[in-house]
Amino acid sequence: MALRRGKEGGEGERWLEVDASMTGTLTFKDPVNLQINGRFEGTLDTKGALSIGPKAQVKATIHGEAITVGGTVQGDIRATTRVELLPSAKVSGKITSPRVIMQDGAILQGTLDMAGGGDSGWIGVDELARYLEVEPATVVQWAQSGRLPGQRQGEQWRFERSRIEEWLAQEKINK
């Protein structure tokens, strides 16, 4: 792993680069700018910017904020802000993001689910628990008590992203 200051996000911005082959789960609770240049297999759960370099080969489930793909990815990608596929990108799997930029030459073999249509403005307990950095049981408890805005659909709780953002802003003001 290496730390660099780069042009990619502006002068002075730091990027953590992974050039090795890795297997497992890589989770970042705090925002970090991560670039994968080698091989990775497993789960990537990041906050901040994630870049999959043009020579990278990734077999993983990827969750993040802003994700740029230049290499090969086999697995599902879920981004909260955007996914960008560079001309050298080859993705096999489902991409879920409110914004997707696909440059000429990029290849997607799979499906695309962009927020704003269907059920994509809603999230489940597990995804909300990851986002809030709490246990899923805590999310359910807060929802059942009325502390957290959510809707019960059968046996499952669903949460509207925009209402969760409003709730978070209100919680910060009250502290």
Image (cartoon, helix red, strand yellow):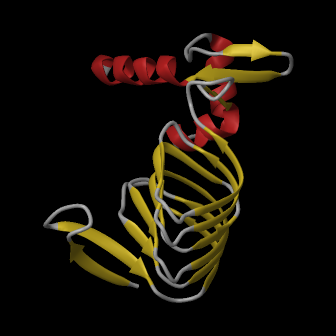
Of the 4 image quadrants, the one containing the C terminus is top left
- Residue 172 horizontal/vertical position (percent): 32, 24
The picture places residue 168, in percent across and down from the top left corner, at 41, 24
Q: Residue at x 39, y 79 (%)?
A: 17
- Which quadrant is home to the N terminus? bottom left
**In this rendering, position of residue 153 left or right of residue 120:** right
In the rendered image, the vertical position of residue 88 relative to residue 161, given as above or below: below
The residue lying furthest to the bottom in this view is 20
Q: Is residue 6 visible?
A: yes
Residue 31 x/y as whole percent = 37, 55
Q: Nearer the viewer, residue 20 or 136?
A: 20
The relative height of residue 53 versus residue 68 in the rendered view (above or below) is below
Question: Could you say which is closer to the camera, residue 133 or residue 166?
Answer: 166
| The furthest residue to the left | 11
Q: Hey, which quadrant is residue 138 in on the image?
A: top right
Residue 89 against residue 20 in the figure, above or below: above
Residue sitting at x 41%, y 18%: 166
**Residue 144: image x %, image y %?**
69, 15
> Which residue: 68% across, 24% down?
119
Q: Left or right: where does residue 60 sit relative to residue 36?
A: right
Outermost residue toward the front in this view:
104
